[in-house]
Image (cartoon, rainbow, N blue to C red):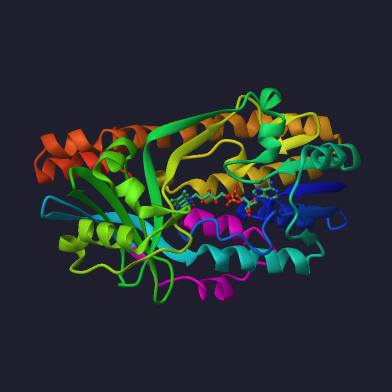
């Protein structure tokens, strides 16, 4: 079998590993637009189900991998209006994106998969891949070119939130995950912090785009797509009282609109979508890698157990579409709650706000 994978992110690499494991003679080529493993994102929270999926890869060594991860935690602190509530959280570890992607890429290359970096694709390339390969996999993230090239065929749509987020580094070390909601310049800033390395945490700040703009925080902080020092200081002051002097770092950080992708079909002819390129989830659900790996594993299994490619892709679509749509819908409840965070923050007392934050419109709390 000949497969071309567009995108060497977690989804594309995991798919290649599973396919190679199930069919060692498969010819797989991964094309990646960046010159090396992409720094698209700083680092992730990994829970047990993700380890189980990684453990399914024959060459995966948990010991070697855990060495790249932080010490684990099993609680989350939620802070707002001077109230702190500590809640149970599924046992998790943190990892820098670069370390995760580099580790998967090394396994992929050792398995004999060709990975071509610095490949800027155009529509002719995609047509040629489709003609020459048995299957083309679009694993090229939220702004996927494969998805947009066959947008109508996939029934692709995207929901853009009224909120924006920025993904920052933070040098003060926290031992666990913390979510802090703080009003600064009339804007409710939701800051989610978790450890991703021995000396680095990450902090994702989300807030209403319009309010960020009118407060000056959106335009002041952004210079040439990068956050300026003045902007960082401004955000640091936003969280200063909670973190007694946070030290934020811009690592190619910029404000982006929160976007969640969806589609009516995951496949078209011999092309399949997976990961953020297909149906994505709002990051606050913490489900991104889990659903990406599940879909990648499922596609590899269908392709190798059903030798007829159109039938295998049909099975993949039937199995994964309902699962991904329901994961995405659950995460959208969280996204919609966060879009109204300013009014909840204004109307509710600390305890009630934290309780509502924990549920975010769901009956069962994620935190
Ligand atoms: C703020 C934030 C926090 C998150 N935190 C978590 C978390 O804690 N835990 C979790 O499980 N998930 C988390 N996620 C979700 C996680 O980032 C995604 O699930 C994951 O990145 C999906 O992987 P992917 O391979 O589908 O896409 P990506 O990671 O976006 O990788 C796509 C790859 O394709 C490449 N590419 C793009 N365009 C092209 C092109 N034209 N040609 C070739 N290559 C191309 C990119 O360079 C990249 O390497 C978070 C997301 C956000 C936004």
Magenta range is: 46-73
Q: Is residue 317 visible?
A: yes
- From the top left corner, tell me how far across and down residue 122 is, in percent: 77, 42
Dividing the picture into quarters, in which one does residue 90 lie?
bottom left
Q: Is residue 310 above or below residue 98?
A: above
The residue closer to the viewer here, 215 or 140, is 215
x and y percent of residue 334 in the render?
35, 37
Which residue appears at 53% of the width and 62% of the height? 97
User: Which residue is depicted at the point 38% across and 47% down?
Assistant: 165
Task: Residue 127: say if magenta.
Answer: no
Most extreme residue toward the right is 132
**Residue 163: image x %, image y %?**
36, 38
At a point 63% along the width and 67% down the height, the residue shown is 102
| Image-based side of 34 in relation to 210, left or right | right
- 190 and 275: which one is in front? 190
The picture quadrant where one finds residue 71 is bottom left
Q: Relative to residue 184, is residue 174 drawn left or right?
A: right
């Amino acid at each position: 079998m000949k497969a071309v994978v567009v995108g060497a992110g977690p989804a594309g690499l995991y798919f290649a590993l599973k396919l190679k494991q199930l069919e060692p003679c498969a010819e797989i080529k991964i094309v990646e637009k960046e010159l090396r493993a992409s720094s698209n994102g700083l680092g992730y929270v990994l829970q047990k189900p993700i380890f189980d999926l990684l453990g399914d890869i024959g060459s995966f060594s948990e010991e070697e991998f855990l060495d790249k991860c932080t010490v684990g935690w099993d609680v989350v602190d939620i802070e707002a209006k001077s109230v702190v509530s500590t809640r149970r959280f599924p046992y998790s570890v943190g990892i820098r994106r670069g370390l995760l992607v580099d580790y998967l890429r090394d396994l992929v290359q050792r398995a004999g998969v060709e990975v071509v970096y610095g490949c800027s694709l155009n529509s002719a390339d995609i047509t040629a891949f489709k003609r020459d390969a048995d299957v083309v996999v679009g694993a090229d993230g939220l702004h996927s070119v494969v998805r947009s090239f066959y947008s109508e065929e996939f029934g692709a749509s995207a929901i853009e939130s009224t909120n924006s987020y920025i993904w920052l580094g933070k040098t003060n070390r926290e031992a666990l995950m913390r979510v802090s909601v703080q009003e600064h310049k009339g804007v409710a800033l939701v800051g989610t912090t978790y450890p991703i390395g021995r000396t680095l945490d990450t902090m994702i700040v989300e807030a209403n785009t319009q309010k960020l703009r009118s407060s000056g925080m959106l335009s002041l902080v952004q210079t040439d797509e990068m956050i300026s020092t003045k902007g960082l200081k401004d955000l640091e002051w936003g969280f200063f009282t909670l973190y007694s002097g946070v030290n934020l770092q811009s690592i190619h950080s910029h404000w982006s609109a929160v976007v969640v992708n969806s589609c009516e079909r995951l496949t078209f002819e011999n092309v399949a979508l997976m990961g953020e390129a297909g149906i994505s989830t709002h990051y606050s659900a913490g489900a991104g890698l889990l659903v990406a790996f599940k879909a990648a594993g499922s596609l590899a299994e269908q392709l190798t157990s059903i030798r007829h490619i159109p039938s295998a892709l049909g099975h993949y679509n039937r199995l994964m579409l309902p699962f991904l749509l329901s994961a995405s819908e659950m995460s959208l409840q969280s996204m919609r709650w966060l879009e109204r965070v300013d009014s909840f923050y204004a109307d509710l007392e600390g305890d009630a706000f934290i309780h509502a934050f924990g549920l975010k419109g769901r009956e069962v709390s994620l935190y």
